[in-house]
Image: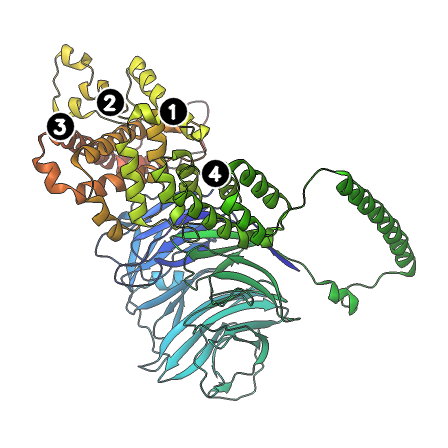
Amino acid sequence: MAALYEGYTLCGVGTVQNSSNIGILGVEQGRDIDHVLVTDSSRFITVYKVSDQRPTGSWSVKRGQMISCPAVFNTQSQEYVVVTDDKVVRVWNKDDVNLEKAFKATVSADVLRVLSATDSEPVVLFCCGAVRFLDLLLASPQQPIEHVLAEDEIIRWSTIVKAEHQLVILFSTEQRGEHCLYIQRFDPNTLVKHRFETEPGLSAPISFSATCRGSNIHLLYLYLNGSVYESVLPLRRSSTGAEGVLALSRSLCLSLPLGEEKLMSGAVVVLDEAHVAVVGFPHPSAGPCKDYICIWNTHFQTLQACKEMAGRIYSQLWCYSGKMYIPHGKMLSVIPFECQKSSLAAALGKQKQTSQSDVHSFFKCFGFYLLLSLVILIIFLIILQNSDVKSALTVDQLIEHIKTSAVEDVQAEVGEFIRWTPQADLQLAVGRLALELVSRSQTDANFYPQCVFLRLLETRYLCYSVCPELLSLAMVKKDFHLCQIAFQIFSDIPEAVTCSYLKTILSTSDSEMETVNLDTDSVMFMKELTRAQSRSDEEGGQLNGFCSPALESDVSDTPSNKLQRDPLALDMSCPVGLHKGALLNEVLQTAYSDRPLLPHLKDFTVPQVIVFLQYLRFLYFKYCHDAHKQIRALRTPSISQIIDWVCLLLDAHFTVLAVAPEAKRLVSDLHKFVRSQVKLYTELGKIEGSLQVLKNSKRSEDFGMYAIQVIELF
């Protein structure tokens, strides 16, 4: 048996410009099982702590530079490794903040990937098929690299497998329609080439997954026709003297259903010796939809668990330490899973045999628990018979009731339906109920079951694409509580809807907004954030090295100027009400793509843009003072999200803000904020060398009660 548990979002992702592919190059294991390293297809590398769903470190390359392969973590040296622009190998540690100042070396040939295994030195795989251990390569970066592959032979997939204290590199290639598998061993150093079997009308494998069990490597590969084959490769190849290309023997271990839709991609990952996870292939009973993650049992050819994913699945799948990482829609989700041995294995005698006394004890305990279960079942049935609980309606019956019943009756019936319906059936029924409720609410002005909508959202089975009109209806009704919960749950909200909701918030007065019942945690965050400003003013201190713009621009040695308070800081009160600020914070945390968002931002009026920018300036000021770090809140916008939205608004309304008189002071203030931060980082950069010398200086251990130590700073 296998089970998929409730997943959660690790981070948002976007598509690569001018491409339909997701912007993720890879997800690699970090320094422990609770950290992963996410490399996107643009310029960023981020380390996430999975249990907290938060980044613990992030690095980026300059504009114009390109990350060539997923970054990996070297468990031996506790350093990160990545390749940029095909030939530049960069190595850094968690304390480095700038990749440009980290170690880098340019090699003599294009690198395909850096492959890393736990407690082993990373291996560099070149596009030409050659391999080098990382340390040996960095010791002589310009060493000549031999060409293993033919000139027009291209590597399509690669991985590293570690077992019995040895490393094995596997990579598949394509050359004029012929597909081969190479196996590079290091002990002894051998390279073996295999040719994949071909069938009429069967293309190349679209996904691979390799694991080591016992003394063999088990390679699974998936074809577009749904066939999953397995090839067993020995860890240590016997020396037979045979040369040339060898045939790759295989066995069919699973046939996936195709459905009616023509498939172009998919992915498979081995979970254990009997279970595989598959994305990109349709659920057997869910029609043409293929946005599912499924766990199949290869021994019994059965579907063990499945989960529908909101938004498009991009046929990328990684698995580490009982968690699967799946990009879909605009997010990277983490799905915990569990695989157990099937009970059929015990029936076939594959488990450890027990003694005769153990068998007798087992059946005695089994009989006792069986009797106890029957008693509990009888009591439960009696309680059900004597209770006043009305049996839940079917989904079709409930939909008919929604069309005519009063709000109170609908609320009670939907509540009973959610309570008694199994989760698998509820997942499919929630969308139908939401559509019918929205449809009646749009035609009947007196019908608006807010509590029912909130109950459906609490099931976590709704997404925007399932019921697109729900958010539009809530905005018309100005149901900001429903909108807030939806923006917390929905991950596939289009950019046009995000901007429409943002305009609704900005166009609503603060007095009207303060009467709305919102999430308590979000409102408390705003209250504490505004209180933090008053405390900071009373103390008269600046935190986090922040230099106020006014003081930075007008510095004088006169005592009066030294004691003068910053006029901007005195005017840095929250420009919107607490409730409006809480709703704006939810928008700031919504996933989006820049290109489709900008045209809709241009529809904002000048007053709306100015108010929004003033609020972003307020948040930025707070974050520069570290005021948010003392506040416990579940959902808060990050400093990068605040800066991104400032940049988006400036890009969308650059001309208007440049000529509008009422925007002059605001733009000037933002300029001063940025200039002060640039000056701060410039000053920090000047002392970086000195701080590094102090950090790396080694204290002498052969001194007594008193010693003088001289440290030279350059």
Which image quadrant: the N terminus? bottom right
Are the residues tagged 3 and 1 within 8 Å (C-beta)? no
Q: Which mark, by number, is residue 449?
A: 4
Q: Earlier in the sequence, mark 3 or mark 2?
A: 2
How far apart are the two marked residues, 4 and 3, measured between alpha carbons?
A: 45 Å
How far apart are the two marked residues, 3 and 1, measured between alpha carbons?
A: 32 Å
| Residue for badge 3 | 665
Residue 58, horizontal then vertical, whole percent: 35, 46
Seen at 36% across and 64% down, the residue is: 137
- Is 284 left or right of 465, judged from the image as shown? right
Are the residues tagged 3 and 2 within 8 Å (C-beta)? no
How far apart are the two marked residues, 2 and 1, measured between alpha carbons?
A: 25 Å
| Residue for badge 2 | 572
Report the mark closest to the observer, 4 or 3. Answer: 4
Dot 2 amino acid type: Met
Q: Earlier in the sequence, mark 2 or mark 1?
A: 1
Report whether residue 709 is seen: no
Q: Is residue 490 above or below residue 347?
A: above
Q: Residue furthest top?
A: 560
Q: Earlier in the sequence, mark 3 or mark 1?
A: 1
Q: Secondary structure at mark 1?
A: loop
Q: Which mark, by number, is residue 515?
A: 1
Count residues near mark 2 (Cα–Cα under 10 Å), then give few for <14, some for 14-19, many for 20+. Answer: some
Q: Earlier in the sequence, mark 1 or mark 4?
A: 4
